[in-house]
Amino acid sequence: MGRFHRHPDGTEHDHDHDHDVGDHSGYTETGAARIMVLENILSENDRVADENRRDLQAAGVRTVNLMSSPGAGKTTLLRRTLVELRDRVRIGVLEGDIATSIDADRLEGLGAAVSLVNTDKGFGGECHLDATMVRSGLARLPLADLDLLLIENVGNLVCPAEFAVGEDARAMVYAITEGEEKPLKYPVMFRAAEVVVVNKIDLLPHLDFDLDRFLANLADVNPRAEVIQASSRTGDGVAAWCDWLLTLAHP
């Protein structure tokens, strides 16, 4: 679906502009109609994202949209995060998955309110959360009792970065098992992230992975991204990630 407009800081914004919906010139008969449909979808998503943002701000909740590819370690990182922060900040989790409650179940009992949103009702399973899906999940959370909301988006390196959901910040979990070239191949995702947690760093001695090359590729795409090297399995680097969240929650 191309590269879409995004709101990187989650603040006030103007919708009097065109979304970048990619090159549709190959669709000689339907290109204009496709662009119009995509513009309408994205404009409506932005409208609902604004509503989400207003409601979250009114409740005093700061929100992070956490994105990654499948299997990068988002849920394991969240488990450690909830344990680390449960006595320091009131956290809610909005868990997005195509199907099942497997990840949401893993987060239960760790001191956080958890709301599950499955996306399998649309087109066999939407590959991202949009603002309307998030709005439905927000209705099941006690926003007045929260300081920080962590949205675990559907595992995908493309679509989640293209849809605002009302977040204050975007974070990404990247696993070193994915290869050094990923920032170059998926620049929209890496460009959208304010912080990149380089996960599974404990596997570095066992992989043919060039960390310096990855960091250079990331800097080429997003030189402003903060980088945290971590291991969700061992806990290395989790404290730095939690410090970043606390700074966001209590600016």
Image: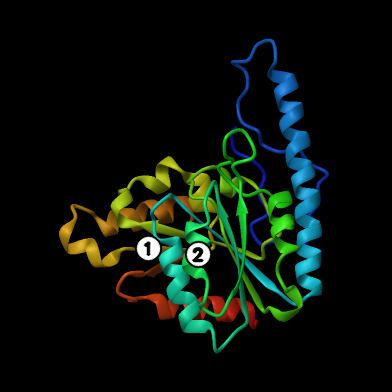
Label 1: state its secondary structure: strand
Query: From where the camera sits, is residue 227 visible?
Result: yes
Query: From where the camera sits, is residue 224 visible?
Result: no
The quarter of the displayed image where residue 139 is located: bottom right
Which residue is denoted by mark 2 in the rendering? 105
Residue name at image x 37 percent, y 51 percent: 217
Residue name at image x 60 percent, y 84 percent: 89
Judge the density around disc 2: few (<14), some (14-19), many (≥20) Cα neighbours within 10 Å.
Answer: few
Residue 91 in picture, x, y percent from top left:
61, 77
- Name the foreground residue: 148 vs 5: 148
Q: Is residue 171 above or below residue 209?
A: below
Identify the amino acid type marked 1.
Val
Is 33 left or right of 87, judged from the image as shown?
Answer: right
Callout in the foreground (1, 2): 2
Compute the Cα span from label 1 to label 2.
25 Å
Is 63 left or right of 32, judged from the image as shown?
Answer: left
